[in-house]
Image (cartoon, rainbow, N blue to C red):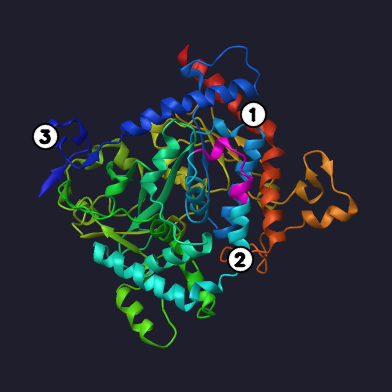
């Protein structure tokens, strides 16, 4: 066994490894940021009507942090992006992070290498088509045969198949008209000139014998790399799932199609499969703290296909299994002295390295929504130097618990009962603290206004009525189908909330530019 240090990337003896150790950004991401800065600087100059070009040090890094929620979060993100596009602010964004349902939006958009440079109507129209179609075709005999064939092929390639792989294939059907051949590494084409924000997909690594409250480790996925944030350990995206030992690639597996990753990123919604089949009628909590204990029963139509599918799905739990790319490594005795490691206080095992770094053959990964509904951890890495966060929901309590630089969130009792459309939080006295624009998905002034400053007439009032929270809401987290009307209302609400609060967004960008100038003085 080899002990790994947190400064391995500086050791020449480890430069020939097939994985990367270190907390700095990879060279591809650094190159991307240099190119993206040109788009951001140009957009800010146009939006604020600046007389001169911004210097590099004046250009802020702006990130969108999304939260999950199935079709609701998928549709809401489309609306928010459309609002930013209409404000000419989409080119100001350098990062978009997602989990669960928002990964569906991101994966679909990044098939188009220049999506943010175009009108979004075609993408939104296609998403509406998929969100409103009948989903019972998931269980046709042809689809069942397709699932069987794909799972058998995946197993032959060397992957350990699970219920989550089946769920990924069903997501493929839910979001597409046919087979989706795309892979995550292919999204590099959408970043080659810095023409779009960098997408970051988030998951958490878990251990069978511990609840997510006791043990979880953040995992980030970009078109360049996949890595465990706590250890600063990364592999090339096209190598994720392949077999490693002591940092060297032993067996290269074909890169997974993105639908299998979507199954993992949104595994919390795999209970949809049971609901559609009519097998889940109890009142048990939908978010168990031990996701591997979410019992999944798969019933298929009588006949030979049933036994074939049962043979392919040897593991029936909600955790995706991938080869452990840290296999063969142990932690150095002084690992807790590394500030980057100790910063994430997410596990009770940090003081017991032999338990923390078990030499398991596989890593168990789940939807981060099993733990907390946020995709923020990768963007709070100090190396990314994010100045402004456009936060499309809330999870701020987590940051204070983790002692992560974050502005104090001050909400009145009235605000907590009835959230407003937008809040601006910043703390100029806290080094490394981002400016936060908090945009919860609420239906406030949209009830009476169809556009900023344009009141609804009596015949239009119905269009402003959205039930987002009740038990019978059409937008409940596990809904798998919308009507056209429900889809358009949610899309319009999300866009409206961005447009109606444009001044607060602009204020945050101005503060960020001023801070950068002051920091250079």
Q: Which residue is mark 3?
A: 13
Q: Which residue is mark 2?
A: 133
Image location (x, y in percent) of residue 149:
35, 71
Dot placed on the residue nearer the N-terminal end, 1 or 2: 2
Q: Quadrant of residue 474?
A: bottom right
Confirm whether the magenta stretch covers residue 116.
yes
Q: Which of 268/411 is in front?
A: 268
Residue marked by disc 1: 506
Q: Who's the residue at 65% across and 21% down the image?
A: 48
Of residue 437 and residue 51, the one placed in the foreground of this image is: 51
- Labels 2 and 3 touching (C-beta < 8 A): no
Question: What separation in Å lies between label 1 and label 3 (alpha carbons)?
Answer: 48 Å
Q: Secondary structure at mark 1?
A: helix
Which sits in the foreground, 344 or 477? 477
Q: Quadrant of residue 211?
A: bottom left
Question: Residue at position x 63%, y 22% from top?
Answer: 46
What secondary structure predominates along the stretch shown in magenta? Answer: helix
Q: Earlier in the sequence, mark 1 or mark 3?
A: 3
């Amino acid at each position: 066994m080899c002990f790994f240090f947190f400064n391995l990337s500086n050791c020449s003896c480890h430069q020939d490894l097939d994985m990367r150790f270190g907390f700095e950004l990879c060279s591809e991401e650094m190159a991307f940021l240099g190119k993206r800065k040109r788009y951001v600087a140009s957009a800010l100059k146009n939006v604020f009507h600046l007389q001169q070009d911004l210097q590099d040090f004046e250009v802020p890094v702006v990130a969108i942090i999304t939260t999950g929620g199935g079709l609701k979060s998928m549709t809401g993100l489309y609306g928010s992006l459309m609002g930013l596009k209409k404000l000419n602010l989409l080119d100001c964004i350098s990062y978009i992070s997602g989990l669960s349902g928002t990964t569906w939006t991101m994966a679909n958009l990044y098939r188009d290498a220049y999506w943010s440079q175009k009108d979004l109507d075609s993408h939104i129209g296609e998403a509406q088509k998929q969100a409103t179609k009948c989903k019972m075709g998931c269980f046709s005999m042809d689809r069942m045969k397709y699932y069987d064939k794909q799972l058998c092929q995946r197993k032959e390639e060397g992957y350990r198949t699970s219920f989550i792989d089946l769920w990924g294939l069903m997501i493929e059907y839910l979001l597409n008209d046919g087979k989706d051949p795309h892979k995550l590494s292919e999204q590099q084409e959408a970043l080659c000139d810095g023409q779009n924000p960098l997408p970051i997909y988030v998951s958490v690594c878990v251990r069978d014998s511990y609840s997510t409250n006791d043990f979880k480790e953040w995992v980030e996925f970009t078109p360049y790399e996949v890595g465990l944030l706590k250890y600063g350990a990364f592999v090339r995206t096209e190598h994720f799932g392949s077999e490693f030992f002591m940092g060297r690639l032993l067996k290269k597996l074909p890169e997974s199609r993105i639908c299998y990753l979507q199954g993992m990123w949104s595994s919390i919604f795999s209970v949809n499969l049971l609901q559609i089949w009519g097998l889940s009628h109890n009142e048990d909590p939908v978010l168990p703290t031990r996701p591997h204990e979410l019992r999944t029963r798969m019933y298929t139509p009588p006949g030979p296909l049933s036994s074939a599918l049962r043979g392919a799905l040897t593991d029936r739990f909600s955790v995706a299994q991938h080869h452990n790319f840290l296999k063969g490594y142990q932690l150095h005795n002084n690992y807790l002295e590394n500030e980057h490691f100790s910063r994430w206080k997410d596990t009770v095992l940090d003081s017991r390295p032999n338990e923390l770094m078990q030499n398991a053959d596989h890593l168990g990964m789940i939807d981060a929504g099993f733990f907390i509904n946020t995709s923020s951890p990768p963007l709070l890495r100090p190396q990314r130097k994010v100045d402004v966060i456009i936060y499309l929901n809330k999870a701020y309590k987590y940051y204070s618990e983790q002692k992560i630089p974050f502005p104090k969130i001050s909400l009145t009792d009235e605000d907590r009962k009835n959230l407003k459309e937008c809040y601006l939080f910043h703390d100029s006295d806290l080094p490394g603290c981002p400016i936060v624009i908090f945009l919860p998905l609420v239906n406030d002034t949209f009830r009476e206004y169809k556009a900023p400053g344009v009141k609804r007439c009596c015949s239009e009032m119905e269009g402003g009525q959205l039930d987002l929270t009740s038990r019978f809401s059409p937008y409940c987290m596990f809904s798998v189908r919308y009507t056209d009307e429900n889809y358009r209302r949610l899309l319009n609400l999300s866009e409206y909330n961005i447009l109606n609060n444009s001044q607060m967004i602009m204020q945050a960008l101005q503060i960020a530019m001023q801070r950068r100038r002051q920091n250079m003085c």
